[in-house]
Amino acid sequence: MDKRISAGDEIDSYCTRCKLTLGHIIIAVVGEKIVKMQCRTCNSIHGHRSGVAAKRSSGGGRTAAAGKKPDPVQTLFALWERCIAGAESGREVPYAMDKSYKEEDIVSHPLFGKGVVQKTHYRKCRMLFRDGEKTLVSSNT
C-alpha cells in the first residue's frame, strides 16, 4: 500500500543550491506531483527534480539517485568543506557580535570553530560550521 505524498512530508532530493542529495520538506503538491520543496540544510525553496527523490520514511532505505541513502553527517561535512574551500576571502575573521559580515566570509568562533557565512539578515547571520548551521547575532544592517 502506497502512502500519498503531501505537504509537510520529508524526502531526499537534489538541492539546486547545495548541489547534493539532501533532506527536503515538501511545500506544495499538485495532484501527485511535487512542485515546491525546501532544503533542510540551506533553507532554499526550489522545484522538485523528478527521478532524484525517494520517500524518507520508506522501508527500502534507498534513493533513486545514489543507490543508497546518503549519510547526513557526511553530506553536511562535505558541504562545509566545499564552502570553506570556495570562500572568496581566504582569511579568517574572529567572531564578534558587534561586527558586520558578508556572505562567504570565513569566521573563527570560540565555541563552534571555523565557519562560513551563508546568509546575512538584519542584526544576524546564518553560518555553516562543521557540526551544523547556526544563526548568530551580528551588526549587519
Image (cartoon, grey):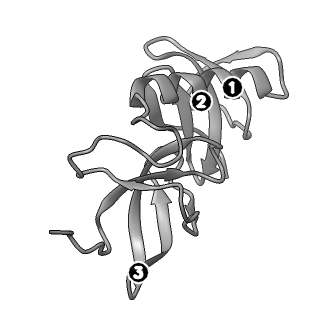
Instruction: Give the residue type at disc 1.
Output: Arg
The residue tagged 1 is: 82
Residue that protrudes farthest toward the left in the picture: 1
The image shows residue 15 at horizontal and vertical percentages of 58, 51
Residue that protrudes farthest toward the bottom in the picture: 31
Instruction: Give the residue type at disc 2.
Output: Leu
Q: Earlier in the sequence, mark 2 or mark 3?
A: 3
Tell me which corner region of the image, top left, top right, bottom left or bottom right, holds residue 68. top left
The residue tagged 3 is: 29
The image shows residue 133 at horizontal and vertical percentages of 47, 35
Tell me which corner region of the image, top left, top right, bottom left or bottom right, holds residue 25. bottom left
Q: Pick whichever, 107 or 78, lies toward us.
A: 78
Q: Pick whichever, 42 or 69, lies toward us.
A: 69
Q: Is residue 141 left or right of residue 74?
A: right
The residue tagged 2 is: 79
The image shows residue 80 at horizontal and vertical percentages of 59, 25
